[in-house]
Image (tube, helix red, strand yellow):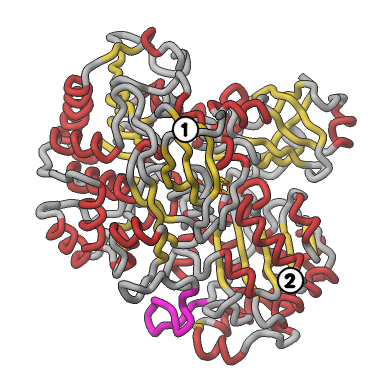
Amino acid sequence: DSRAFDREVKSVCPFCGVGCQVSLKVKDDEVAWVDGIDGPANEGRLCVKGRFGFDYIHHPHRLTKPLIRREGALKGMNVDPGNPLSHFREASWEEALDAAASGLARLRDDAGERVAGFGSAKCSNEEAYLFQKLIRQGFGHNNVDHCTRLCHASSVAALMENVGSGAVTATFNQIENADVAIVIGANPIENHPVAATYFKQFAKRGGKLIVMDPRGQSLKRHATHMLQFRPGTDVAMLNAIMHVIVTEQLYDRQYVEGFTENWDALAAHLEGFAPEEMEPLCGVPARTLREVARDFATATTGMIFWGMGVSQHIHGTDNSRCLISLALMCGHVGRPGTGLHPLRGQNNVQGASDAGLIPMFLPDYQPVTDEGVRSSFAEIWKSGDFSDQKGLTVTEILDAVHAGWVQGMYILGENPAMSDPDLDHARAALAKLDHLVVQDIFLTETAMYADVVLPAAAFYEKSGTVTNTNRQVQMGHPAVPPPGQARPDWEITQDLARRLGLDWSYCDPSEVFAEMKRGMPSLDNITWARVASEGAVTYPSQSPDDPGQPIVFGDGFPREGGRARFTPASIIAPDETPDAEFPMILTTGRQLEHWHTGAMTRRASVLDAVEPEANCSLHPRTLRRLGVVPGADIRLTTRRGSITLMARADRAVSEDMVFLPFAFVEAAANLLTNPAIDPFGMIPEFKFAAVRAEAS
Ligand code: SF4
């Protein structure tokens, strides 16, 4: 029987932030297939990645032994991931951990600030917590960050500033109680496919779905309005919508007076944003802007969902400020069917951020600059004289490497040699490091620059909790053993910590979770045993039998006085504007079948078969003008680099745009992207660069 299996193990899909629960069917110590089960975020549903994207864990490229770079071997992308022994030699765990720790300790003892760490949103909550604890306790500073910096950092900055909390105010499932929903700068059918099924059901039962995106997308088939605005003009468009709500007196006066502050400043600011004046900027007819404003403001219940199209701009924080203001002025927060929901990308980016993998915050977003907070963690950790200064962010750390301030790094599960903007700059920084320790499941592009490579277990090979976009804490259980000598990340980090002189003695991730609870009020009433037995608990949970609150802030906000704030936003042009040399706009993103830098999904046989080749999308008329037939090669060039890859015709892309997925190492999108950053969230402008496209 080809469908026979030896055992069934429950876990959580390791790809996107939806957090679909899965049942892994295991045969002969290999995952044979995956089914969706009845988790709170998926109710049995899975997308193509969750269902078919699992066999990367059995790929022959898996790291099975620790590796140490051979004396004199070159660093970088010249290493063959299938034959790492040309540049590395195998080592015992003892030797590799000693080499990893002694190199980092040498730099620490020289001057602690010289070491920095990138943790991972693909590891468990417990592993993220231990990673930030290692950097803070072991090196005495806060130079620790992770991929939230490239993802929703600007959304979190705006949410923290204006509603006092960085997490969603309502689960995406609340759309079933909504009358109207805005989806902006997100493409959920490709990037959050199971969440998108709830959005489609909402539209089917008559909900008004308003999609706003510079790129067309298939969700528009379900929408009452599709606003295909000009890239980078979010603030102009959103301010125009709010202008209508203010001038037509459609706002919720009682809510504004009872729950918010700074209304007069916002209302005065919006006077200059009449739709008729914004139409030439954002490209959306004034009539449509007025209709959307009326639909959203007059609905009893409304939600706003957003993605990287909002956050990955130099004005990403301003974009989110506008969305927060829009929801607040309509009173669309804190009730069933209302809420603000930045759709999280990675499976555990919410949990890794909550666990303190951020340079300015200890766990639960408690500021490192607060002496009381630092001393309470020093007490929990029984030591920890770490800095009161905010640490460096992802992009700042790589700049600091070039400047010579940071000379050593510990990178766990991140791939900056593919994920950071302006890759030549990022890769040169990795090559310049005096000592680089990389812990991962594959010899990633980043691991090719390492001095020591530590082989880690994949998520389906270990225990741990993860927190999805809905604030739901869920648990994975080990289904198969890790290959060779690979081990769970928390064990490796602990072994490294001990060699750095820290007195750690965790026997199980549950002990780490218990320690996290001591410093994280968000985990009140949530225990390891509860998550294991109930399958999921949403935070905040108000009692040991409360499954958790899907909606928060019904009775005020966690800010001084309990009021949310309106922060006006002005129009800021993108960092680069198209010109004669680079006349088009480049925007990057994901495709349904591939995950981020491709390390996992390009080694998943079905997904790689469905989408095997580096590609970019342009409007058919643009291709004709350039003399490129669909399927032929095209050359893309920005001020930072050049790549050649296959061109696809796609009417969803406007005639002056190129859409470029970033999963393909052979035509790495981030060789082209602009490293200019948002000053608040410190997030790069991945969604806008000036580009030239030409026949190859
Ligand atoms: Fe996995 Fe996200 Fe797909 Fe669910 S929607 S199966 S979590 S990739």
Image location (x, y in percent) of residue 207: 73, 71
Badge 2 crowding class, 10 Å Cα cut-off, few under 14, some 14 to 19, many 20 or more, is many
Q: Amino acid at mark 2?
A: Gly
Label 1: few (<14), some (14–19) or many (≥20) C-alpha neighbours in 10 Å: many
Residue at the location (85% across, 71% down)? Answer: 287
Quick check: 168 left or right of 222?
left
Up/down of 114 relative to 307, above or below? above
| SS assignment at label 2 | loop
Q: Is residue 553 magenta?
A: yes
Q: Nearer the viewer, residue 292 or 53?
A: 53
In the displayed structure image, the side of residue 309 where residue 492 appears, left or right: left
What separation in Å lies between label 1 and label 2 (alpha carbons)?
40 Å
Q: Is residue 422 visible?
A: no
The picture quadrant where one finds residue 598 is top right
Q: Which residue is mark 1?
A: 31
Please state, as top left, top right, bottom left or bottom right, where the N terminus lies in the image. Answer: top right
Looking at the image, which residue sits at the far front?
1
Question: Does ligand 1 reach within 8 Å of label 1's beta carbon?
Answer: no
Q: Is residue 295 above or below residue 318?
A: below
The residue depicted at 39 percent of the width and 27 percent of the height is 430
Q: Is mark 2 within 8 Å of ligand 1?
A: no
**Mark closest to the chain's N terminus, 1 or 2:** 1
Question: Residue 582 or 94: which is nearer the viewer?
Answer: 94
Residue occupied by mark 2? 207
- Residue 92: x percent and y percent? 21, 18
> In what element is the residue under mark 1?
strand
Residue 580 falls in image quadrant: top right
Mark 1 or 2: in front is 1
Residues drawn in magenta: 551-565
* Residue 447 against residue 678 in the figure, above or below: above
Residue in view at x 28 percent, y 44 percent: 131
